[in-house]
Image (spheres, grey):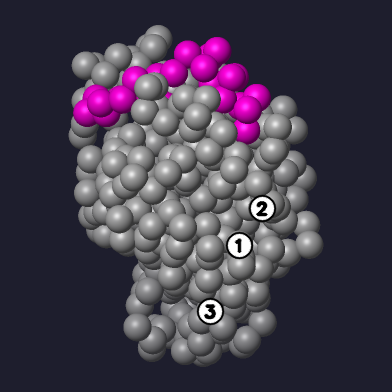
Amino acid sequence: METPTARVEVAPRPLVGLDLGELLALVRAAGEPPYRARQLYRGLYRDHAGRVSEISTLPLALRNGLLRDCGSGLPEVRQRHTSADGTVRYLVGLQDGRTVECVFIPERARDTLCISSQAGCAVDCRFCLTALMGLERNLTAGEIVGQVLAIAGDRDLKPRRRPVNVVMMGMGEPLLNLGPVMKATRLLADPAAVGIPQRRITVSTSGIVPKIAEFGASAVRGKLAISLNASSQGQRAEIMPISSKYPLDALLEVCRSYPLRRWERLTFEYVLLKGVNDSDTDARRVAGLLAGFKCKVNLIALNPGAGIEFGIPSDDRVNAFRSIVHRRVPCFVRKPRGRDIFAACGQLRRTASPPLVHPDPSEGQNL
Ligand code: SF4
């Protein structure tokens, strides 16, 4: 019969999201030897995707005691919506009852997980469905890394055997929740934890200028993507009000001095809105703004949704824009994934009943 473990005498915090030092304090407080912390760390992040009860290297009484006193904190998969292209949009539940969305995107050579850094978003980009929710709250590091663990557990992903990319492009502005984002990144990137290399992690920002330098100063960090979306300050301020606070020239200036690592380049994302920012003149201006940067440009034709007032540019317009930019800066068209289930870029808004074929804005429902 298992003997009951001593109660943990530290403030109870969910296990998922704690780093090795914090786990060490926890197992010491429970009267256990320090090596249990490493077993717990590996079990949580590397071997069992946050499922504490399955960490068989730990005595059952310790597992039960930790779960009783701290809780696992692993987000719970509540809903899955599967696209015709194999993309899956997940709704996951957090401990306080809130929910966020994250997306699994299968590709031939790897899988990509798009995760959220906040519940909702305060930034108010005009082309984004998440913006319509407003900000509910920041996520903790455990809730950020927990989305990766929840999807990995659900799909039996093994990042050490088949490459997994993580992009923080779901709900929220990661640089407005920088501390938890950086801690989650360290847990994701640590080979003894989740083990996803830094070069496979991307953090996307709408351009929070003062935080970009802080992000770049971190020893462990993902790659940086900048959501550009306009060819002039006036145009950008119209579709991204944040640009009034952090103007385009200040954004480009901080990007110019960004400390890229040897293997790294910046990504500029550009959502094309029909008749707004998709002309040949816009393309020439974008090329002019970004010439000289070590970067690439990803073009995304608008992903529609109820409440978004812009139109989708034609494929010909997208390709013409790409050709012009590509003369001076590497430029690619990103194929939308999961548009039919509201899983594509800018579409995360907990839409409950996705249409089966093509998204018709009038059909969207919210929980
Ligand atoms: S695009 Fe990103 S930063 Fe802008 S409102 Fe949507 S979630 Fe927020």
Left or right? Give the position of 196 relative to 177. Answer: right
Based on the picture, tell me whether residue 303 belongs to the magenta stretch: yes
Q: Nearer the viewer, residue 76 or 163?
A: 163
> Which residue: 62% across, 33% down?
325
- Determine which residue is flagged by label 1: 256
Q: Nearer the viewer, mark 2 or mark 3?
A: 2
Q: Nearer the viewer, residue 169 or 52?
A: 169
Residue 5 magenta-highlighted: no
Q: Earlier in the sequence, mark 1 or mark 2?
A: 1
Question: Which one is earlier in the sequence, the residue at label 1 or at label 3?
Answer: 3
Query: Does residue 275 sit above or below 37 in this rendering?
Result: above
| Numbered mark located on residue 23 in the image | 3
Mark 3: which secondary structure?
Answer: helix
Q: What residue did someone put label 2 on?
A: 293
Question: Which of pointers 2 and 3 lies earlier in the amino acid sequence?
Answer: 3
Mark 3 vs ligand 1: CB below 8 Å: no
Q: Which residues are magenta?
A: 300-325
Compare residues 163 and 225 and report the one nearer the observer.
225
Quadrant for residue 366, please give it.
top left
Residues packed near mark 3 inside 10 Å, few (<14), some (14 to 19) or many (20 plus): many
Is residue 50 among what the camera can see?
A: no
Q: Residue at x 21, y 16 (%)?
A: 362
The secondary structure type at the circle numbered 2 is loop
Q: Amino acid at mark 2?
A: Phe
Q: Is disc 1 in contact with disc 2, using a CB cutoff of under 8 Å? A: yes
Q: Nearer the viewer, residue 273 or 25?
A: 273
Q: Quadrant of the C terminus?
A: top left
**Mark 2 neighbour class, 10 Å CA radius: few under 14, some 14 to 19, many 20 or more:** some
